[in-house]
Amino acid sequence: MNDLPWNGHRDGYRSTNLIEEIVVDANFDDARVWVPLADGVELRPMMFDCTNGAWSSLLRIAPGKSLACHYHTQPVHGFTIKGSWRYLEHNWVSNTGTYIFEPPGEMHTLVADPKEGMTTFFVTRGSLIYTDGAGKQIGYEDVFTRLALCRRHFQQAGFEAEVIEGLIR
């Protein structure tokens, strides 16, 4: 039988190993929180898991714009919040309310709906490897490159360092 009080702590003891939760307002309408990645492509960071090499973010792509051809070294989970998008290499469309799972190593080019664009929540682990048309690596991103990009952007946007640092776990 569990003899712990309702909050799960005995005699006021709290473990020092617990990671604090993160609660973030997406602020969809505040242009300052959206970090430009490419023409018409923006990222809203939600969390950086530097220990496990992962990040969670909103990705917003303007109508008809795309994210360059790439693959992931680890699985990716996504949930489309607004609009729709597809991969040029596949025949399915991710509409509002769609969950997607991307296996590692699967190359794809993300294209937003030409009329409404898209906003999708992604949980990404490992690296994102950009490729040319022949599949040759031409760049990469990981939790550390994304964090550095977001730090620069948030500083230029006038945020205190604690805003972005508070998203790191």
Image (tube, rainbow, N blue to C red):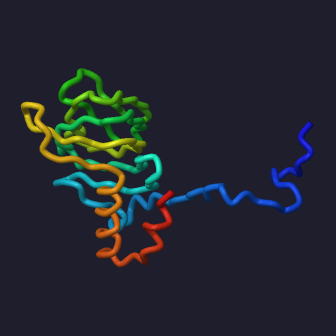
x, y (%) of residue 105?
28, 29
Please tell me which residue is depicted at 21% across the width and 43% down the height of the picture: 67
Please tell me which residue is depicted at 38% across the width and 36% down the height of the picture: 76
x, y (%) of residue 110?
23, 37
User: In the rendered view, would you say 99 is above or below 142?
Assistant: above
Please tell me which residue is depicted at 24% across the width and 52% down the height of the picture: 41
User: In the rendered view, would you say 24 is above or below 96?
Assistant: below
Instruction: Report whether 78 appears left or right of 73.
Output: right
Instruction: Report whether 103 appears left or right of 86.
Output: right
User: In the rendered view, would you say 15 is above or below 151?
Assistant: above
Count the marks: how many?
A: 0
Query: Could you say which is closer to the camera, residue 32 or residue 114?
Result: 32
Q: What is the residue that sits farthest to the left in this orientation?
A: 134
- The N terminus, quarter of image: top right
Query: Could you say which is closer to the camera, residue 153 or residue 73?
Result: 73
Please tell me which residue is depicted at 19% across the width and 54% down the height of the picture: 38
Query: Could you say which is closer to the camera, residue 43 or residue 50?
Result: 50
- Asked which quadrant contains residue 96, the reply is top left
- Asked which quadrant contains residue 77, the reply is top left
x, y (%) of residue 111?
21, 38
Query: Could you say which is closer to the camera, residue 116 or residue 153?
Result: 153
x, y (%) of residue 135?
12, 32
- Asked which quadrant contains residue 39, the reply is bottom left
